[in-house]
Amino acid sequence: MRKIVSALVSACLFAATASAAHADRVVARVSIGSQTMHVYHHGRLIHEWPVSTARQGKITPAGQWTAQWLSRNHRSSRYNNAPMPYSIFYSGHYAIHGTDQIGRLGRPASAGCVRLHPDNARILFEMARTEGLEHTRVIVVH
């Protein structure tokens, strides 16, 4: 009996995980260690891009979030009105966004956000807008 209950619980957990993963139509997986982003659409890897995450003394938090809001031409209220084109905010003031410092991509350079080449930020922004924020997941790992 215990084995049957355990098998049923495992099956239910697997089904819940599978349906949650299916609900995420767009997944942006950021690796702080490799300074890369992998973009998945309906579970299929479609892009791999260099990023910049937090420089020394700053933090890009690790975790998983559903995208919260979009801002096409955002300007930072914290950092001298710095341009943050194609922003996808996912946790408070943390966002994925384009940068004009493309020469720094591939190494830590930001104040905590995830920076992308503006062309790539536009692609991801449009995917999130088209598929819906509720179906867009941001995952940041060390």
Image: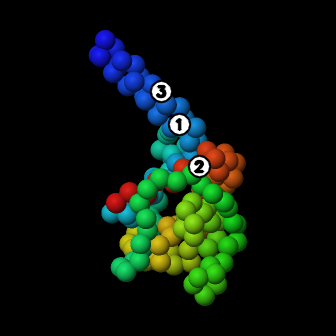
Which label number is shown at residue 20?
1
Closer to us: 37 or 66: 66
Mark 1 or 2, closer to the camera: 1
* Residue 32, position as x, y percentages in the image: 37, 63
Q: Residue shown at 70%/71% (left/top)?
A: 73
Local crowd size for mark 2, using a 10 Å CA cut-off: few (<14), some (14–19), many (≥20)? many
Local crowd size for mark 1, using a 10 Å CA cut-off: few (<14), some (14–19), many (≥20)? few
Which label number is shown at residue 5?
none
- Residue type, numbered disc 2: Thr
Q: Give the Cα separation between the discs numbered 1 and 3.
A: 8 Å
Quarter of image, res 62: bottom left
* The C terminus, quarter of image: bottom left
Mark 3 or 2, closer to the camera: 3
Counting residues from the start of the chain, the first of labels 1 and 2 encountered is 1
Q: Find numbered disc 3 in the image and state the secondary structure of the residue it sits on.
A: helix
Q: Report the side of 14 relative to 46 (left or right).
A: left
Residue that badge 3 annotates: 15
Q: Give the Cα separation between the discs numbered 1 and 2.
A: 11 Å
Closer to us: 7 or 126: 7
Q: Report the side of 4 relative to 132 (left or right).
A: left
Q: Find numbered disc 1 in the image and state the secondary structure of the residue it sits on.
A: helix
* Residue 11, position as x, y percentages in the image: 41, 22
Closer to us: 128 or 91: 91
Quarter of image, res 108: bottom left
- Vertically, is 48 above or below 59? above
Q: Is residue 120 visible?
A: no
Residue that badge 2 annotates: 136
